Amino acid sequence: MAKRIAVSTLNASTIDILNTIRANASYEYQNVIPVIDSEKDIPRVGELLMGYPALANQFINALVNRIALVEVRSANFNNAYKELKKGYLEFGETVEEVFVNIAKAQEFSVEKAAAREFKRTLPDVRSAFHEMNWRVMYPVTIQDVDLQRAFLSMNGVQDLIARIVDSIYTAAEYDEYLLFKYLLIKAIAHGKMYPIEIASGDMKNAAVAFRGTSNLLPFMSSEYNAAHVSTTTPKEDQIVIMSAQYNAQFDVEVLSAAFNMDRAEFMGRLYLMDDFTKFDNTRFDEIRRNSDQIDEVTDAELALMKNVKAIIVDKEWFQVYDNANKFIEDYVGAGLYWNYWYHTWKTVSSSPFSNAVVFVDDSADTDLPETVEFTLVGIDKGENTTVLTFEPTDKATLAHMSYNFVQTKNDTQAGTAVHRYGAVIIPKSINTYSPVMEIDGVTYNGTLINSIAEATAGTTITFTKQV
């Protein structure tokens, strides 16, 4: 079960830290290292530790594993996006998110009662799996000379802890912030959020759009989430995300009134992003070269973000968990230093069942193209059916649009099943097929596949906007 890490701060003095480590150390450590009562005893502890390498190892391990790690965990929990994380997963690598769509009503009929008595009515159950997909480590080295210096002043040990934590935590916190930004950019650029146009230069009308959307989300609708399930987002579950510059143009009182919240309540749900059009790809260059944990944020995706002004999401949209935070140490005798690796593993994902709305400047070029091209990427021939799979030929063209393949009346009559994201199951008896799709609610007709039996992967299908 997920749990949140308790908030804690390091407020102990160097004397307290040294005595606490001694109290929890081995019998040998306690026999050699005395309890200290004043600042003048601190250098003596340093002299003894440097004379006993085994005890120095115990000290540095306790310092990092028991104290520095507490600081890192506390800081991780208290970052700017702490309320959007779902907690700490001690076990397992996958979170299954289950959504049960609302049931559909039927008319009451005495005549149909007998036929319905034992008929099975299965619920519309959807599921999404969020897997642990972020496993990185941050190395840090502590030299013997660092340990010696730690005992030369009253705050020496605290300063040593600060150096250890700052070198790791600053990097880990910044990377975590980038991961939240990554989720938003990828979702918006690939049509996973419901777009609403606003006149961003007209603050009053923009505020009206915010208020109207915020008022609509508590009502049952399938329009505002990627999976198009019927759901709601109450006011208390709405999170507001804005670019820093755009937010600066608003008076806080105006914004809080727009969302029907008092100032304090609104500020607790407002999160800022520095700039939606920039992403620090270089932070993850090495990770991308050696693994598939994260894709590059492309220039085309960032270009689509230039008109994004604000976002409202359900707090459950972010599916981000901590899976592990662990220090591993190794003393290098040849170099007289300790190597530490801080491992942090996370599940970084978003929910397709949660409402998410993005507000874009209406000055953006939102005209739909006359034609779009898809590629037939998969042909899976079974005994009785053939499965065709389509993907956009140029993904950047459709990145800011919401497209769905449509099952027409003719498809239903022919026994063809169409998945909204581009998979079509066709009976063996059917040898021709013309796909139909919608882009932002506009119908597009695809070119005819004359012979399914002879179709080949790589074939280009052109969709033309219906007049």
Image (spheres, grey):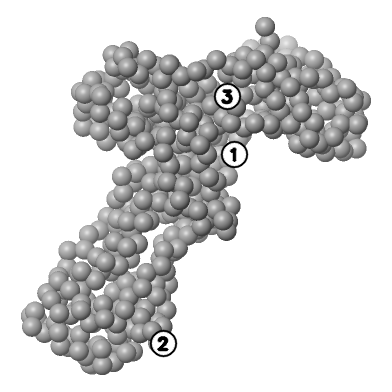
The crowd level at tag 3 (other Cα within 10 Å; few <14, some 14-19, many 20+) is some
Residue type, label 3: Ser
Q: In the drawing, what numbered circle is on residue 1? A: none
Residue 334's tag is 2
Question: Residue 60 appears in which quarter of the rendering?
Answer: bottom left
| Inter-mark Cα distance, 1 to 3 | 21 Å
Q: Viewer-nearest of labels 3 and 2?
A: 2
Between tags 1 and 2, which lies in front? 2
Seen at 25% across and 33% down, the residue is 267
Provide the residue designation for mark 1. 127
> Is residue 149 left or right of 53 when viewed as pictured?
left
Report the residue marked by disc 3.
Answer: 402
Compared with 111, 40 (above or below) is below
Kindly state the secondary structure of the residue where label 1 is placed: strand
In the image, 399 versus 80, the foreground residue is: 399
Whether residue 22 is visible, yes or no, is: yes
Task: Determine the residue positioned at 83% across, 38% down.
Answer: 380
Q: Which of the two discs, 1 and 3, labels the residue nearer the N terminus?
A: 1
Residue visible at 55% across and 53% down in the picture? 288
Q: Where in the figure is residue 117, as x and y percent of width and height?
A: 71, 24
Left or right: 47 as drawn, with respect to 175: left
The residue under the point 14% across, 84% down is 43
Residue type pointed to by label 2:
Ala
